[in-house]
């Protein structure tokens, strides 16, 4: 695989510590959910990255497929839970809103994007990811 970009982050103190990009571009205090301590948690960080990556991939795939989207919005909802074997796993819902397409075209676009997005490829076969698609065709009488 040809690598286009690589970054590195370092965490200290686990879920109650701090994480930072090694280049100094971003640093965050971490907090365990429900602890009352201010800070982010790994699931929130994963949700931020997945939402941004998928929404960007959606625009690229729409262009490749010559689909005239006029806008999009992707929300990633990331949960964590315990598996029957005692380990932990993530659970993800992607909520994708697309402007400018009909329902069938929108679903085709989202499914194609799910095959291209790096986060989707990383989760494939490992994490349950459910896709929820909403389309807005806009004013058809304009």
Image (cartoon, rainbow, N blue to C red):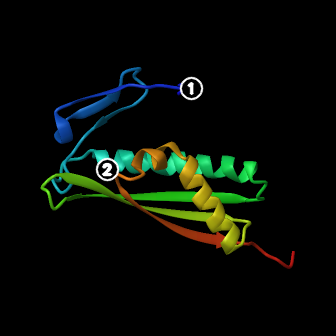
User: Could you classify mark 1 by the number of other residues whose Cα lies within 10 Å: few (under 14), some (14-19), or many (20 or more)?
Assistant: few
Q: Nearer the viewer, residue 63 or 83?
A: 83
- Residue behind mark 2: 43
Observer-side mark, 1 or 2, equals 1
Circle nearer the N terminus (1, 2): 1
Q: Is residue 129 above or below residue 120?
A: below
Residue 113 percent location from the top left of the image:
59, 53
| Secondary structure found at label 1 | loop
Q: Nearer the viewer, residue 14 or 116?
A: 116
Quick one: which residue is furthest to the right in this view?
142
Quick one: which residue is furthest to the left in this view?
86
| Secondary structure found at label 2 | helix
- Residue behind mark 1: 4
Residue 40 can be seen in this image? no
Residue at image position (34%, 50%) is 44
Residue at image position (62%, 67%) is 107
Residue 87 can be seen in this image? yes
């Amino acid at each position: 695989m040809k690598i286009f970009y690589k970054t590195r982050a370092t965490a200290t103190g686990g879920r109650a510590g701090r994480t930072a990009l090694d280049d100094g571009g971003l640093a965050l205090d971490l907090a365990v959910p429900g602890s009352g301590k201010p800070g982010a948690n790994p699931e929130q960080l994963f949700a931020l990255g997945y939402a941004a990556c998928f929404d960007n991939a959606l625009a690229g795939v729409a262009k490749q497929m010559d689909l005239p989207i006029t806008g999009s919005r992707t929300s990633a909802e990331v949960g964590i839970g315990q598996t029957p074997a005692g380990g932990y796993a993530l659970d993800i819902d992607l909520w994708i809103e697309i402007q400018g397409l009909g329902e069938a075209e929108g679903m085709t676009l989202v499914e194609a994007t799910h095959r291209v997005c790096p986060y989707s490829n990383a989760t494939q076969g490992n994490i349950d990811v459910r896709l929820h698609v909403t389309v807005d065709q806009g004013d058809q009488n304009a």
